[in-house]
Image: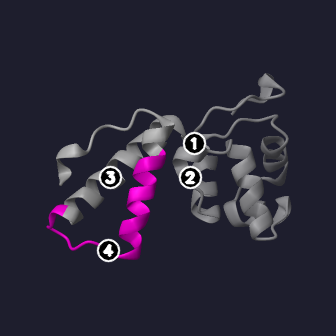
Amino acid sequence: MTDHIKIIHTEEEYNNALQEVEQYFLSPPKVGTDAGDRFDLLILLIEAYETKKHPIEYPDPVSAIRCRMDDRNLNQRELGCLTGISESKISEVLNYHRGLSLDMIRKLSAVLKIPTDILVQEYPLLRSDLAS
C-alpha cells in the first residue's frame, strides 16, 4: 500500500495528500499496519512540504516582547522590576532604538517565556548609536 507514495512537489499533490490524511482521522489506522505506515509517511511528507513552501516566520524580537507584555498586562516599569532591566533600556528596545544584549535576552526569555531563538534574531534599529 505504501508503494505509491512519493515526494510532494505541487499544491495539487499536497491537497490530495491532505484529503487522504483526513480520511485516516475519521478512522485512525493501527500502528504497524500498511495503512498505519501510509498515514505516518503522508504526515511526514505533508510536514516537509509545508515547511518548505509555507514556512512560519518568527515575529521580530520587539513584537514578541510587546505581545507577551500585552498578554500579561505589563507596562515597562513592571517589566523592568521583573527582569532587573532599567525602564529606560526597555523603552529604547521597545522603540527600536537599542538592540538586545545577551543579558537582556536571558532575562526576558526567563520572565516572559519567549524562546531565545526568537529573541536572538537580528532586527533593524532606528538609531544604531545605541546598539546593545
Magenta-highlighted residues: 15-34
**Residue 37, located in which quarter of the rendered image?**
bottom left
- Whichever of labels 4 and 1 marks the residue nearer the N terminus, that label is 4
- The answer to whether 73 appears left or right of 105 in the picture is right
Q: Residues within 10 Å of mark 4 (few under 14, many from 20)?
A: few
Q: Residues within 10 Å of mark 3 (few under 14, many from 20)?
A: many
Residues at circles 2 and 3 in contact by the CB criterion of under 8 Å: no
Q: Residues within 10 Å of mark 1 (few under 14, many from 20)?
A: few
Q: Residues within 10 Å of mark 2 (few under 14, many from 20)?
A: some
SS type, badge 1: helix
Mark toward the viewer: 4 or 1: 4
Distance, label 4 to label 1, CA atoms, is 46 Å
- Residue matched to label 4: 28
- The answer to whether 61 appears left or right of 41 in the picture is right
- Residue matched to label 1: 102
Amino acid type, mark 4 = Pro
- The answer to whether 120 appears left or right of 42 in the picture is right
Q: Residue at x 40, y 66 (%)?
A: 23
Residues at circles 1 and 3 in contact by the CB criterion of under 8 Å: no
Q: Residue at x 85, y 41 (%)?
A: 95
Distance, label 2 to label 1, CA atoms, is 6 Å
Distance, label 1 to label 3, CA atoms, is 41 Å
- Whichever of labels 4 and 3 marks the residue nearer the N terminus, that label is 4
Q: Quadrant of the N terminus?
A: bottom left
Residues at circles 2 and 1 in contact by the CB criterion of under 8 Å: yes
Provide residue 12's location: percent of width, then percent of height: 48, 39
- Whichever of labels 4 and 2 marks the residue nearer the N terminus, that label is 4
- Residue matched to label 3: 42
- Residue matched to label 2: 106
